[in-house]
Image (cartoon, rainbow, N blue to C red):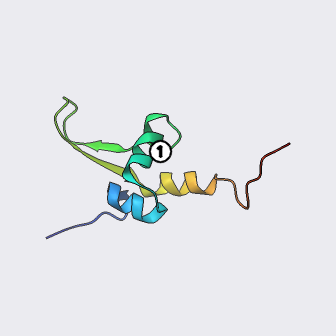
Amino acid sequence: MKYPSKNLLRISEVTDWLGVSKSWVYEHVKDNSFPQPVILGQDDGTRSASRWVREEIQVWLDARPRGVQTDAE
């Protein structure tokens, strides 16, 4: 039986919500321009699961510019 969290999102849920690719998420996580995931499991280099905190992504979204972006001259 699955018990999905309302607060922790899988990568597929993040990409579906934002309409971006997995590589986009990981690229922006790497350069610290997107919220960092919570790593579930051991911190010993073995495979583990990553989850993103919904509220952190919402704060990130709320801080994004709105409207049409134009080049400043």
Residue at 31%, 63% (x, y): give it: 5
Q: Position of residue 69 (x, y in %)?
A: 73, 54
Report the amino acid beneath label 1.
Pro
Q: 29 or 63: which is nearer to us?
A: 29
Quadrant (top left/top right/bottom left/bottom right) for the C terminus: top right
> Is residue 40 shown above or below 2?
above
What residue occupies the far top of the structure in this picture? Answer: 44
Give the total of numbered labels: 1
> Is residue 71 shown above or below 45?
below
What residue occupies the far bottom of the structure in this picture? Answer: 1
Quadrant of residue 10 within the rendered picture: bottom left
Q: Position of residue 43 (x, y in %)?
A: 22, 32
Quadrant of residue 3 within the rendered picture: bottom left
Quadrant (top left/top right/bottom left/bottom right) for the N terminus: bottom left
Residue at 48%, 41% (x, y): give it: 28
What residue occupies the far right of the structure in this picture? Answer: 73
Q: What secondary structure is marked by label 1?
A: loop
- Using a 10 Å C-alpha cutoff, classify the residue at mark 1 as few (fewer than 14 neighbours), some (14 to 19) or many (20 or more): some
Q: Position of residue 57 (x, y in %)?
A: 49, 54
Q: Is residue 68 left or right of residue 22?
A: right
Residue at mark 1:
35
Q: Is residue 69 left or right of residue 53?
A: right
Residue at 21%, 42% (x, y): give it: 48
Q: 12 or 53: which is nearer to us?
A: 12
Q: Is residue 64 left or right of residue 25?
A: right
Q: Position of residue 36 (x, y in %)?
A: 42, 41
Q: 46 or 42: which is nearer to us?
A: 46
